[in-house]
Image (spheres, helix red, strand yellow):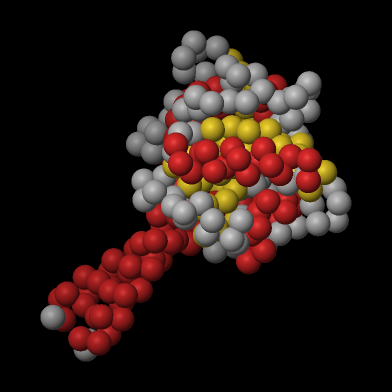
Amino acid sequence: MESLALRLLEKFTADRQKIERYSAIAETCPLPAFVSGSDGRTILYVNPAYTAMTGLQLADVQDGNWIKSIHPDDRAEAQASWDTFTKTRQPAARYHRYVHKNGTVTPAMRIVSCVENNGFVGFIIPQCGVPTCPLRQLNSPIWQLAGLIDVQPAPA
Amino acid sequence: MSISAAELIAERLVSYRDEVHKLKAVLQLCPIPVLLAHNDGDVILYVNPAYTFFLGGTILTVQDGAWLNHWCPEDREAIKNYWAAVVKNHITSSLRARYIFPPDGGLKNARITATVLESNGIISFVFPEICWDVQLPIQVIEAQNDP
């Protein structure tokens, strides 16, 4: 039993180091990011860049309240596209205007993908909705990388 | 070590596994290249799929400074000096340089940023030129040897 405990302790230490490493990167990532559970309503993680862009912390975005970060005129489409994504589980990109709690509006592209454990990961690329943003190009390597098959062009 | 301690660790391992899975998913799907180095700057601990896509390097091929080979030969000295300054002075800064894009071997512009972690390690993000118009919420200082 002691050897089992020692093996567990070794595994414990290794996993803790992994968490510290991965967490440091996610926390430093300049792109706003979030992780959702498989139900699409429980948000498991938002990084500091997400909070900086929306003013919302992890506790603020539970039970569908992430929609508060979307411009009122874009909320219906944002909700509908999210519901479709969680059902079809196909990677998707959608343009929305994000609204910070202080009123600042940021046009951005939300790209979402499924992860192995049935949850979802999303990245929000600020300014991606502006006409000059090259990320709007549908043949961008970023979209190829994300394996996106359902890219919605941003409005002109 | 008692059985209860082992059980406690096992329980904690389950929560750690979930945490690792969640954070790793973020890194794996991050659309911009990410590289994590040990604080000596030589041992590379992690590169994400976007790094491999844009620069062609994998965790096995970027060790011992080999990651420099993915950059334009004319820019390598500046990148090497930049990286050495980050490692030595623990500064967060950025540098523009050209990387070799694997699909066609052409040179593409990119901006490198590097941040030294308080705990241990150096995180570097590479922003390909197609991302330059994105106003990212980061504060960077242009390196003096910016080409």
Total numbered badges shown on the rendered structure? 0
Counting from the top left corner in percent of width and height, residue A32 is at 65, 47
Mark yes or no: residue A108 visible.
Answer: yes
Counting from the top left corner in percent of width and height, residue B56 is at 44, 26
Residue shown at 85% from the left, 48% from the top? A104
Residue A31 found in image quarter: top right
Counting from the top left corner in percent of width and height, residue A40 is at 51, 51
Counting from the top left corner in percent of width and height, residue B43 is at 43, 46
Image vertical order of residue B39 relative to residue B111, above or below: below
Image vertical order of residue B139 relative to residue A59, above or below: above
Q: Is residue B10 shown left or right of residue A18?
A: left
Mark yes or no: residue B132 visible.
Answer: no
Residue shown at 71% from the left, 26% from the top? A154
Q: Nearest the camera: B47 or A119?
A: A119
Q: Is residue B128 shown left or right of residue A147?
A: right
Image vertical order of residue A143 relative to residue B64, above or below: above
Residue shown at 71% from the left, 44% from the top? A75
Q: Nearest the camera: A49 or B57?
A: A49
Q: Residue furthest right?
A: A103
Q: Nearest the camera: A24 or A54?
A: A54
Residue shown at 74% from the left, 39% from the top? A74
Q: Quadrant of the C terminus of chain B?
A: top right
Q: Quadrant of the N terminus of chain B?
A: bottom left
